[in-house]
Amino acid sequence: MQELSCTSCGNRVLVEKYSPTHTSVQWLTDAEKSCPDFARQAAEGVHSNWVRTCPSLRDSIEEAARKGVLETDSPRSYPVPGRLM
């Protein structure tokens, strides 16, 4: 995963972009405390588990991918086929 900052608020997250449509984001801090969009929705009573994404962060990720700052073809590990215990 690559570290990336939101161009709107400066919040830092880890991002991995497997394809143009598949992006994985790992927050480094509590989203409701570090993201203005999540904080606003939390103040309105929407819990972060129900907030799908921050539009500003999504735009930052897409811009980084377009500029080549964020790799799009990162290798992905898949689970080993087998039975779940």
Image (spheres, rainbow, N blue to C red):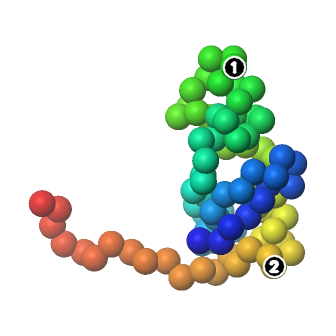
**Residue type for callout 1:** Ala
Residue extending farthest top:
44
Label 2 Cα crowd, 10 Å radius (few <14 / some 14-19 / many 20+): few
Q: Position of residue 82 (x, y in %)?
A: 19, 72
The residue mark sitting in front, 2 or 1, is 1
82 lies left or right of 48: left
Q: Is residue 46 placed above or below 30 in the rendered structure?
A: above
Q: Residue furthest left?
A: 85
Residue at x-position 53% and y-position 34%: 49
Kindly indicate the quadrant of the structure image that contains residue 68: bottom right
Residue 17 seen in the figure: no
Kind of residue sitting beneath label 2? Gly
Q: Quadrant of the N terminus?
A: bottom right
Give left or right: position of 80 versus 76: left
Image quadrant holding the C terminus, namely bottom left
In the foreground, 35 or 46: 35
On the image, the x and y values in percent for residue 8 come to: 87, 48
Q: Which residue is mark 1?
A: 43
Q: In screen coordinates, is 16 left or right of 83?
A: right
Instruction: In this rendered view, identify the residue nearer to me: 81 or 8.
Output: 8
Residue drawn at (33%, 72%), measured in percent from left and top? 79
On residue 84, the disc is none
Side of 80 relative to 34 (left or right)? left
Badge 2 element: loop
Q: Residues within 10 Å of mark 1 (few under 14, many from 20)?
A: few
The residue indicated by pointer 2 is 68
